[in-house]
Image: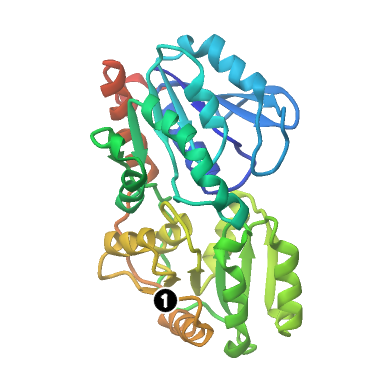
Amino acid sequence: MRIGVVCNAYHPDVGGVETHVRRLCDGLVAAGDDVEVLTQHATRSTSIEDGVLVRRFPLTVPAGNYRVSLPLWRWARDHAVEYDVLHTHSYHALVSLGAALVRHPTPLVFTPHYHGTGHTRFRAALHPVYRPLGRRIIGRAGRIVCVTGAERDLLLRDFPEAHGRVVVIPNGTDPRPVVPGTRPGVRGILCVGRLEHYKRVDRVIRAMAPLGPAYRLDVVGDGPAASSLRQLAGRLGVAGRVVFHGRLDDAAFAGCLARASAVVSASAHEAFGMTVADALAAGIPTVASPIPAHQELAAMAGTSAWVRLTDPEDETVLAGALRDAAAAGRSATPAPLPTWDDVVTATREVYSAMTGMPTIPAEAGGL
């Protein structure tokens, strides 16, 4: 099957959507599919990365949150018929609008990664204005893939006309070695994600003050809030115990995960919560904000997983939860969460239903 994947950004750019798209594309190629990624970048380029043909189109509007590449829209218009299925990602990126508005007969699958609002006051105010255009994307998609039941419910609240076309396929996790017990030395707390205000990393930094010198916070990720977060750590006198790693490659991130005594996500909005899933899959005690996506992940992980849903607005309670998590020690067994192989299998079944083309198991049609 020939699949065109449309996304706002692609590896080596880092983020939850970027990770989802990359792992999906890698798995589709391994299953024998022909995959092209259509994405946006500062400059035009074409490359083959891990068997995936990546077409990067130059930006017409380079604004960080409202990037638009008209060359990508034109390519989709002129070449969409060359794909058996077109799969576009993210309601919150204008790239999906281009894939939906251009006229072509190719079946369209849409994974919205939907939060239901913007992450600044300005962006939240734009959501009602954008909704009619978002409705065009929803209306054009033959199947809509949500990554949690919570995301599905939020999407159907705002777009009830999508009922009957929504499929839930949870994000995957990577099998990792599970090493039970406590980590030696300083108790490291790992916080991963794009540094935007809605991730509420500032609450985690504030919780470090009462924890004392035996605890260290590793912050992995970058974004517009990075500078203010560093300043906050300095003002609170915890700068020496808060390490900002920026973006890390897979190997470096795996090292941080291996050293962590606990993982925390204070995010106010998530369609899934990949940080929480990766931690639970590795048996790491996890503290997470009690948003619907995290509640769903905690239920999926089961009673054997150490996870505490905690309101990050209460710094004292958050600090106590982090202290308990770091002292709990890792589980001897990983949480039974879906893998990326599961995601690829379920997604290929969606493609097959859309196109009428049978899926061929990887071992039968492999590369």
Q: Position of residue 163 (x, y in %)?
A: 25, 37
The amino acid pointed to by label 1 is Thr
Quadrant hosting residue 161: top left
Residue at horizontal 71%, vertical 77%? 233
49 relative to 170 in the view: left or right: right
Crowding at dot 1, Cα within 10 Å, few <14 / some 14-19 / many 20+, comes out as many
Q: Is residue 246 above or below residue 68?
A: below
Q: What is the basis of the colouring in this image?
A: rainbow
Q: Is residue 193 above or below residue 78?
A: below
Residue at horizontal 30%, vertical 25%? 361
**Nearest the eye: 51 or 332:** 51
Mark 1: secondary structure: loop
Quadrant hosting residue 165: top left
- Can you identify the residue that label 1 sits on? 310
Q: Position of residue 273 (x, y in %)?
A: 44, 56
Whether residue 332 is visible, yes or no, is yes
**Nearest the eye: 284 or 276:** 276
Q: How many labels were placed on the picture?
A: 1
Q: Is residue 223 above or below residue 285?
A: above
Q: Position of residue 279 (x, y in %)?
A: 44, 63
189 relative to 248 in the view: left or right: left
Q: Position of residue 232 (x, y in %)?
A: 72, 76
165 relative to 198 in the view: left or right: left
59 relative to 170 in the view: left or right: right
Q: Indicate the quadrant containing the N terminus: top left, top right, bottom left or bottom right.
A: top left
Q: Indicate the quadrant containing the C terminus: top left, top right, bottom left or bottom right.
A: top left
Whether residue 31 is visible, yes or no, is no
Quadrant hosting residue 2: top left
Residue at horizontal 32%, vertical 30%? 143
